[in-house]
Image (cartoon, grey):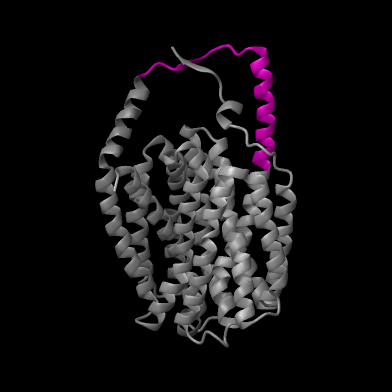
Amino acid sequence: MTRDRLSFLYLNIGHFLDHLFTLVFATVAALALTREWGLTYAQLVPYAMPGFVAFGLFSLPAGRLADKWSRHGMMVVFFIGIGLAAIATGFARSPFEIGVLLFVVGVLAAIYHPVGLAMVVDGAKGSGTGMAIGINGVWGNLGVGSAALITGWFIDNGGWRAAFIVPGVISVLIGFAYWWHVRDDIRAAADKRRLRATSPPAQTAAVPPSASSGRDEARAALIRLTAIVFFTTAVSSLVFQSTTFALPKVFDERLQGIAGSATLVGWMAFVVFAIASMAQLVVGRLLDTLGPRLVFMGAAALQLVFFAAMPGLSDWTALAVALGFMLGAFGQIPINDYMIGRMAKSDLRATVYGVRYVVSFSVLAAALPLIAWIHGRWGFDTLFYVLSLAAAAILAAVSLLPRQIPDGSVAMGGVAQRG
């Protein structure tokens, strides 16, 4: 295996672990703690909120630190740090303790998306950006699905605590292996920073009026695109969090005729997540050929149809419809990342991804009390009606996307020359 392929593999494993660790508690709360701690599902869900708040808020400083210090170094911190935090969470003795420790998990989980995605885009070969993001996204979604599967298995075969501890140990070991793989890159990044600090500042050359006019038009298009990206990021995050966090509980309620144990519920959720994650490969290829506007509209329309169809269904029909809306929910994930990768300049890409994920995961955190509130009063049918409205809002917004994504380095950059 070449060095570049091995680096990409580490980044993909990181995406898998990132989503695995952030969703272990969703299955633990639904299938174990309601019985062990004597609390309702609605009472347990809010203890996950601090972790998802941290998941969002710490994305920006993580991305900024990676751009200023070392992206490779931040990934080492991610692997080792989140592993240790997960191990500690496995020893929680009360809802308060698990909430505090999930916050620490969220702080460290915040590192991956701004840093890992910037590295994926940097490593992609031009027109293959969409496919690279799609492949990386599949690994992340397999982490989502495996959270329910692995946790369900541990609940039935040793207890929920092992679902935190065992993956935590594995992550720490991977972290040390990754550090060995990139130790020279971390050292090279430090040398580059020292060289930059002693170099004279760049001078900006005069720009001809015609070039200035063209750049103004590109800048206006970029501002419009940015507004759409961040709106759809927020609403898509509501959809993604609601489906991925609540699906084990939805299946626990709706699939009683075909899934009678925690392990079977975990398997059903894993199968849906795993199949749906393949949509990212298709979307990645289509992004490189058709562009984001048409692809995004298709993903939003798919969600709208299947969310509206889900209320009242059970067993095999519910399973099939859940697969339909998860195809749309997972399929849309690479699209905003693709557009940001095109918009943002390379040396600021982790920072821009950090801003994107502050928005995204802040909405994720807000979705948790919404899930608990709706489920506690009306059940999941009402949640699916709300999600169908969210999908309609996404569809309306993406219809305003420009057909071509402006290059951020042209729209926002100047013509720089070294003085």
Residue under the point 51% across and 39% down? 127
Q: Is residue 358 visible?
A: no
Horizontal and vertical percent position of residue 61: 47, 43
Horizontal and vertical percent position of residue 60: 50, 44
Q: Is residue 370 above or below residue 360?
A: below
Q: Is residue 3 left or right of residue 291?
A: left
The span picked out in magenta is 199-227
**Of 299 and 151, the residue lying toward us:** 299
**Of 13 and 172, the residue lying toward us:** 13
Residue under the point 37% across and 24% down? 196
Residue under the point 47% across and 79% down? 33
- Would you say residue 225 sits in the magenta stretch? yes
- Would you say residue 158 sits in the magenta stretch? no
Q: Is residue 201 above or below residue 364?
A: above
Horizontal and vertical percent position of residue 174: 29, 56
Q: Is residue 340 visible?
A: yes
Horizontal and vertical percent position of residue 267: 47, 76
Q: Is residue 52 left or right of residue 325?
A: left
